[in-house]
Image: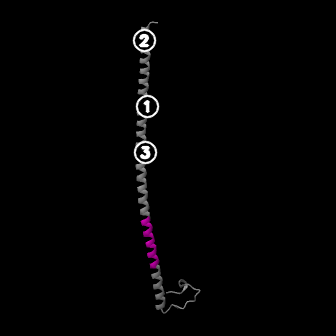
Amino acid sequence: MDTKWIVILVIVALAVIAGVAALMRKRREEELQERRIEAQSHREEADETAHRAEQARLEAEEQAERARRQQEAAEQQAEQARREEAAAEELRRKADEVDPDVDVDVDDTETADEAPRR
């Protein structure tokens, strides 16, 4: 073979190798870009999920606070009812003491509810 043909073949081989290398580099960059886009999509989804979770947490805390306030109000109402029951019982006792038709020396085995009243 002529030297001229050997040089042409080497140049063509180098051009093919350079072309293949350029195509491989381009394909690698495209893959990296696709992975960047996918990663960004995952980050956006994670941000949205975190936002929804934060909203749910805040709503749960608010609901728990409302329940705590309602529980306190119920306990206060129960305490008020106990005080009113005690006051009513005290008034019944005083009424029994004042009423001449009621014997206040009721046997210890009888309860105040069993004592005769008018």
The answer to whether residue 45 is left or right of residue 110 is left
Q: In the picture shown, does residue 48 fall above or below 16?
A: below
Mark 2 touching mark 1, by CB under 8 A?
no
Residue at numbered disc 1: 31
Residue at numbered disc 3: 46
Q: Position of residue 83 (x, y in %)?
A: 45, 79
Marks 2 and 1, how far apart at CA: 36 Å
**Residue at x 43% of width, y 55% of height:** 57
The furthest residue to the top: 2
Q: Position of residue 31 (x, y in %)?
A: 43, 31
Is the stretch drawn in magenta largely helix, strand or loop?
A: helix
The tag earlier along the polypeptide, 2 or 1, is 2
Q: In the picture shown, does residue 76 fall above or below 14?
A: below
Which of the two residues, 32 or 13, is positioned nearer the viewer here? Answer: 13
Mark 3 touching mark 1, by CB under 8 A?
no
**Circle 1 residues within 10 Å: few <14, some 14–19, many ≥20:** few
Q: Residue 59: which quarter of the image? A: bottom left
Q: Which residues are magenta?
A: 68-84
Q: Callout 2: helix, strand or loop?
A: helix
Residue type indicated by callout 1: Glu
Q: Callout 3: helix, strand or loop?
A: helix
Q: Position of residue 56 (x, y in %)?
A: 43, 53
Q: Residue 41: which quarter of the image? A: top left
Residue at numbered disc 2: 7
The furthest residue to the bottom: 100
